[in-house]
Image: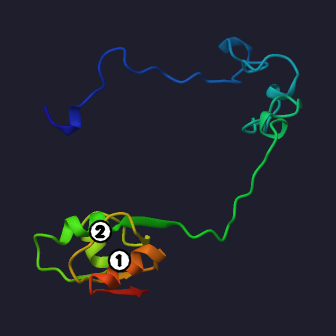
């Protein structure tokens, strides 16, 4: 057996319907589209969400709320997580590359350090945003909070 004599399994393929090839073919005349109506015309394509002229669901259901297109999404990292990552290592500077390598954030994510937990080691933390309690705790431990 080689590539030149491969064939599909018996009965797994069928010939396509040949439409509009005259009345003798069994599929001539209306070409299996039926008589008249929108679907029988050439160029017909059903739009997604179209309900035959009835008001579509996405327009019937009420909309509410507000989506701020300028919202900045931050990846939250707490102090107890930072303490756990640095307690057995000699790392003192935590920047975005560290957060990515630790699996806490993606490359493009903006990082915000929050104040849950305690930190005892003096760390220099580089992040896009800090909560007030996080800055206080980092500086109290002798570290530095640097905003990117």
Q: Is residue 62 above or below residue 76?
A: above
List x then y, in percent, for residue 32. Answer: 72, 18
Give the residue drawn at x 45%, y 20%. Answer: 14
At horizontal 15% and vertical 36% (from top left) the residue drawn is: 2
- Structural distance between the alpha carbons of marks 2 and 1: 7 Å
Expressed as whole percent of the image width and height from the top left, the position of residue 11 reads 36, 14
Secondary structure beneath dot 1 equals helix
Name the residue tied to disc 2.
Answer: 118
Q: How many marks?
A: 2
**Where on the picture, by quarter, is residue 95?**
bottom left
Query: Label 1: how many residues lie within 10 Å, few (<14), some (14-19) or many (20+)?
Result: many
Question: Which circle's residue, 2 or 1, is located before the other in the chain?
Answer: 2
User: Can residue 113 be seen from the camera position used here?
Assistant: yes
Residue 127 in percent (x, y) is at: 40, 79
**The quarter of the displayed image where residue 38 is located:** top right
Instruction: Please state, as top left, top right, bottom left or bottom right, where the C terminus lies in the image.
Output: bottom left
Tag 2's secondary structure?
loop
Q: How is the image coloured?
A: rainbow
Nearer to the camera, 5 or 105: 105
Q: Are marks 2 and 1 in contact (CB under 8 Å)?
A: yes
- Image position, residue 110 (x, y; %): 45, 73
Q: Is residue 78 above or below residue 95?
A: above
Residue nearer the viewer, 92 or 98:
92
Q: Which of the pair 108/24 is nearer the observer?
A: 108
Label ID, residue 137: 1
Specify the quadrant that holds the N terminus. Answer: top left
């Amino acid at each position: 057996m080689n590539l030149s004599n491969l064939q599909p399994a018996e009965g797994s393929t069928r010939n396509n319907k040949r439409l509009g090839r005259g009345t003798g073919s069994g599929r001539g005349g209306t070409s299996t589209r039926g008589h008249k109506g929108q679907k029988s015309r050439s160029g017909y394509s059903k739009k997604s969400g179209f309900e035959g002229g009835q008001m579509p669901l996405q327009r019937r259901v009420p909309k509410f709320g507000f989506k701020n297109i300028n919202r900045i999404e931050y990846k939250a990292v707490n102090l107890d997580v930072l303490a756990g990552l640095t307690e057995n290592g000699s790392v003192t500077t935590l920047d975005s590359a560290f957060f990515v390598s630790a699996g806490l954030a993606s490359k493009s994510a903006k990082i915000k350090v929050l104040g849950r937990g305690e930190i005892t080691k003096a760390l220099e933390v580089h992040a896009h945003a800090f909560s007030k309690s996080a800055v206080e705790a980092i500086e109290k431990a002798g570290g530095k909070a640097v905003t990117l």
